[in-house]
Amino acid sequence: MIKVDRAIIDKTKKLEDASVEAIEKGLEAGHIAIPQNIKRDIDRPCAIGRGLATKINANIGLSLEASSIDLELKKMDVAIAAGADTIMDLSTGPLHEKMRKRIISDCAVPLGTVPVYELACDGKNKFASLKEDDFVDVLQKQAEEGVDFFTIHSGITLEAVRLVEKNPRIMNIVSRGGAFLASWMMINGKENPFYSRFDEILDIAKKYNIVLSLGDSLRPGAIADATDELQLQELVVLGSLQQRAFDKGVQIIIEGPGHVPMDQIESNVRLQKTICHGAPFYVLGPLVTDAAPGYDHIVGAIGGAIAAWHGADFLCYVTPAEHLRLPDIEDVRQGVMASKIAAHAADIVKGIPSALQRDINISKARAKRDWEKQFQFSLDKELPKRVREGSPSRETDVCTMCSEYCSIKILEENLEKRKKEKSS
């Protein structure tokens, strides 16, 4: 049975529309996860799973050739201010350890990493010569540092790699961690250490209360590859690993696709929830078309809204820079906002009371042409204010779209006139 410190649950409850009892039951069933390393005291804890608001993750991190620690920390601050519920540090390059320690120190929300990236930071050639112990040791090291959740690619096995060599996909392995591990297995002829040493990994996760996000190494990177043999074979493996983790009292999240056409999203969510015993589902998008580079934050929001509507619990943001370059600060802000809109739209139909109430509140403010309250209840409180301030009608109660022909105002004035006539 999975247990989380009651103080963490109580702190999380303040941010949810669920009772403490409902959260505890969800944790015990493996349907909810709360990432918080025992070494960290998080200002804004995050519960992810059934019956809760849909959560959003923002990725930041150094690349080998671009960015700086200070810039990435600014991106973190912008992402959290825009509404990101968790941050993942995907840093590569020589400063990755310094970067991670700074984020652990400064991050007000749960922090995740992909530990295999650290192993790869010393170069591709050295990665091939790593020993199995190295894969476990890096998890132990980052756990001691205070990381709250790990993406580990335990579902890609030696058998799956052999299938990869024969598969007819347009895009083969698009997961960076998955590609590292597949290459290591091909070169060494050995099983994936994140799979073969999974029990040791569970012991580390349990000791530090770390959530394991089981990565989808074989997610489709093109919509034509969606829901294929490779993706489904890995999902079955992840389902068996989730059950092993649950039996040991370790919290698990399952990562999902990827690039998926709209008509396959619902079935993907239902498959995951069935095969992985209702574990929280973390979707990377999904992106519903491959044909919109520069607008992939919109593409991802479309897929994310549909996925969350049908039961996905956690959305990884997608920025306008996806597939093109490392995102800048404005890309990060737009990526978070796009995912936040998707999550909110889904939460309305999921029956999250605060989501619907927000829409009711802003609609009432709009009916009264109360601009300040509209800004207050907006998902992005700053952009609508800036847009309004740039309008010639900013000192009036209408906007320049309709001006004096505002439908709300016209009807309001005539209803008031009729009311006076009837009372006289």
Image (tube, helix red, strand yellow):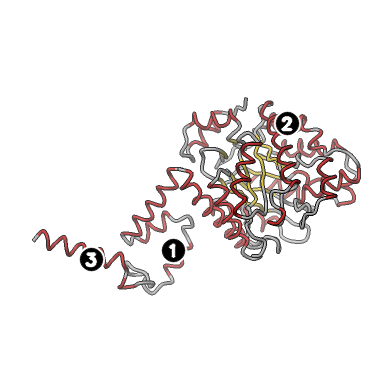
Mark 2: give few (<14), some (14-19) or many (20+) Cα within 10 Å.
many
* Quadrant, the N terminus: top right
Q: How many marks?
A: 3
The circle on residue 205 is: none
**338 versus 46 height, above or below:** below
Mark before the other along the chain sequence, 2 or 1: 2
Which one is earlier in the sequence, the residue at label 1 or at label 3?
1
Image x and y of residue 312, in percent = 58, 44
Q: Are marks 2 and 1 in contact (CB under 8 Å)?
A: no
Mark 3 surroundings within 10 Å by alpha-carbon count, few (fewer than 14), some (14 through 19), many (20 or more): few
Relative image position of residue 309 (x, y in whole percent): 53, 47
Category of crowding for the residue at label 1, using alpha-carbon neighbours closer than 10 angstroms: few (below 14), some (14–19), many (at least 20): some
Q: Would residue 251 be found to the left or right of residue 365 on screen?
A: right
Residue at 77%, 48% (x, y): give it.
177
Q: Quadrant of residue 82?
A: bottom right
Residue topped by disc 3: 413
The quarter of the rendered structure image containing the C terminus is bottom left
The residue pinned by badge 2 equals 202
Q: Nearer the viewer, mark 1 or mark 3?
A: 3
Q: Amino acid under label 3?
A: Glu
Tell me: 59 left or right of 183.
Answer: left
Tag of residue 385: 1
